[in-house]
Amino acid sequence: MSEDRARILNLLAAGKITAAEAERLLDALDGRPAGDSVTPDAGPVIKGDPTPLLNALPKFLYVNVLGDKGEKVNVKVPLALVRSGLKLTSLIPPQAMEQINSELAGKGMSIDFTNLKPEDIDELVDALREMEVNVDGAEGEKVRVYAE
């Protein structure tokens, strides 16, 4: 067993990474070229200690759609955009914010933007690290949403 593979398995055993993260790292190790590199789908290839990369917050939210007739949609949303959007909410007048919250609640989304703080967004982004949604539609459509 390689030193990198053993290090990843030890991190998993110690509870420092999830099984999904370990799988992604092991897959990256299996397909890596001779030097360090980054592959777009497998994530970073690790040489040495992978802990700093695993502790970094995700930078993007990805949405991939494969339609039943072969059409493809790939969307990459920078999570910095979410943080910027939160900062912009501070510019919305309180009366307008109340109306926004009321309209969202009417649509089943009870989010109070007046109480959101930047540290809340960092916690949300950190939680996205372990989120992955895969949907297989009845007509053969496939949707994948994940953060890296």
Image: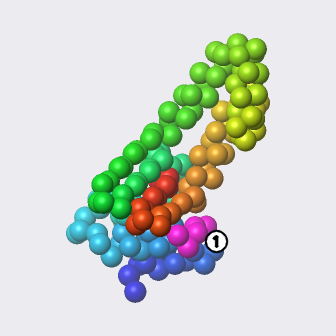
Residue at 47% across, 64% down: 137
Within the image, what quadrant is residue 105 found in? top right
Measuring from the top left, give residue 98's x and y in whole percent.
76, 21
Residue at 55% across, 35% down: 82
Residue 69 forms part of the magenta stretch = no
Instruction: Name the residue tied to disc 1.
Output: 15
Q: Is 120 placed left or right of 84 in the picture?
A: right
Quadrant in which the N terminus appears:
bottom left
Regarding mark 1 in the picture, which secondary structure is present there?
A: loop
Magenta region: which residues? 16-20
Measuring from the top left, give residue 22's x and y in whole percent.
50, 72
Q: Nearer the viewer, residue 49 or 126?
A: 126
The furthest residue to the bottom? 1
Is residue 41 visible in this depiction of the protein? no
Seen in the picture, residue 50 relative to 111 is either above or below; the reply is below
The furthest residue to the left? 34
Residue at 61% across, 67% down: 16
Is residue 70 visible in this depiction of the protein? yes
Within the image, what quadrant is residue 10 found in? bottom right
Determine crowd level at label 1: few under 14, some 14-19, many 20+ residues with C-alpha closer than 10 A.
Answer: few
Seen in the picture, residue 113 relative to 94 is either above or below; the reply is below
